[in-house]
Image (cartoon, rainbow, N blue to C red):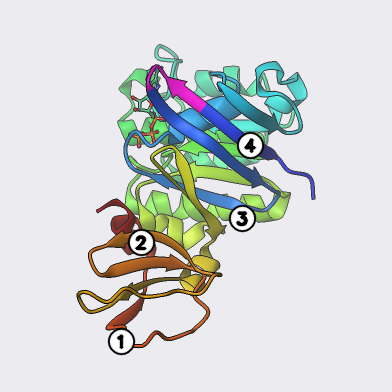
Amino acid sequence: MDALLQLNKVVKRFEANTVLDEVSFTLEPGMVVGLLGANGAGKSTLMRIALGIIDADAGDIETLGEAPAQLSVAAKEATGYVPQQPFGYENATVAMALALHRSFYASWDMQLEQQWLQRFALDGKTKVNKLSVGQRQALAIIMAMAYRPKLLLLDEPVASLDPLARRQFMADLFELALESGSAVLFSSHITSDLERVASHVALLKNGKLLLMRELDEIKEHIRLVTFPEGVMPTFGEHIRVLHRREYSWLIDGYRGETWAGALQCQALNLEQLYLELHI
Ligand SMILES: Nc1ncnc2c1ncn2[C@@H]1O[C@H](COP(=O)(O)OP(=O)(O)OP(=O)(O)O)[C@@H](O)[C@H]1O
């Protein structure tokens, strides 16, 4: 299967701050990857590098098989991006903004545009600078998705959407990826959304990609194991310790085994996992 986005040992520094430290991963058709990480963990930076907006300091990147700094028109037309802070078109109406944007994309799906305008209750006559934050986000989403891109990079796309709009949008994301063989990378701090639609979860911490796994694998193979004070457990070689806090070990590679003296061996949801890794 051809990768739609491939990062190999990507490094990005801003002066002394190493934001991405040898980050590698591959996005393939059909993958919907939720990107998790604390504020400042490098999620936006990673997306901007993939799009050629900023350069990496080291490593290889292929976006739709091309170097991001020299993306062809065809690759640009097959890439959708919703930045964290859209936007432009301030003095235009929604309809004018869409008309201008649409003109760049041969594959624009007018029916999808209209359907989504209705869904988000956006009126074509409203001026962009009169839209609420959530409405701007909805417009940015339509602009990034109505041409059915192969690769979609969404930087906290749902943060300002109301719960119903969020739920519908997330369902559409998944459908788009499955139906048209697209890949989606979206950052979000809303772990319940991620749990609902992501096929994979990627977690950035201190510049490293700590996890890049199928959601089901996370549920199956990650456990928080707690021992009484003073007990030092020995885990099998297949187990990777992701984090330790006092007498609790967060492990990856769990296969149903038990450890003598363990007080508990707990499966975690995404929010619990995130908190465990960051406390
Ligand atoms: N142009 C820049 N110059 C200097 N530092 C930068 C620049 N852009 C980003 N950074 C720094 O890089 C780090 C990662 O920023 P980034 O915006 O990628 O984080 P993020 O994970 O998207 O955060 P958030 O969840 O808050 O949106 C931060 O410490 C930020 O201050």
Q: Is disc 3's CB within 8 Å of ligand 1?
A: no
| Quadrant of the rendered image containing residue 191 | bottom left
In the image, residue 254 lies at what x, y percent?
49, 75
| Inter-mark Cα distance, 4 to 2 | 25 Å
| Disc sitting over residue 261 in the figure | 1
> Which residue carries the number 2 mark?
273
Q: What span is in magenta?
A: 12-16
| Inter-mark Cα distance, 2 to 1 | 23 Å
Q: Residue at x 67, y 29 (%)?
A: 60
In the image, residue 230 lies at what x, y percent?
22, 74
Disc 3 element: helix
Q: Nearer the viewer, mark 1 or mark 3?
A: 1
Q: Say if 261 sits above or below 111 in the image.
A: below
**Amino acid type for the residue under numbered disc 3:** Glu
Q: In the rendered structure, which disc, 3 or 2, sits on the residue that comes first in sequence?
A: 3
| Inter-mark Cα distance, 3 to 2 | 27 Å
Q: In the rendered structure, which disc, 2 or 1, sits on the residue that comes first in sequence?
A: 1
Q: Is residue 50 in the magenta section? A: no
**Amino acid type for the residue under numbered disc 4:** Leu
Disc 4 element: strand
> Which residue carries the number 3 mark?
175
Disc 2 element: helix
**Amino acid type for the residue under numbered disc 1:** Gly
> Which residue carries the number 4 mark?
7
Q: Nearer the viewer, mark 4 or mark 3?
A: 4
Q: Residues within 10 Å of mark 3 (few under 14, many from 20)?
A: some
Q: In the rendered structure, which disc, 4 or 3, sits on the residue that comes first in sequence?
A: 4
- Horizontally, is 228 left or right of 200 in the view? left
Q: Nearer the viewer, mark 2 or mark 1?
A: 1
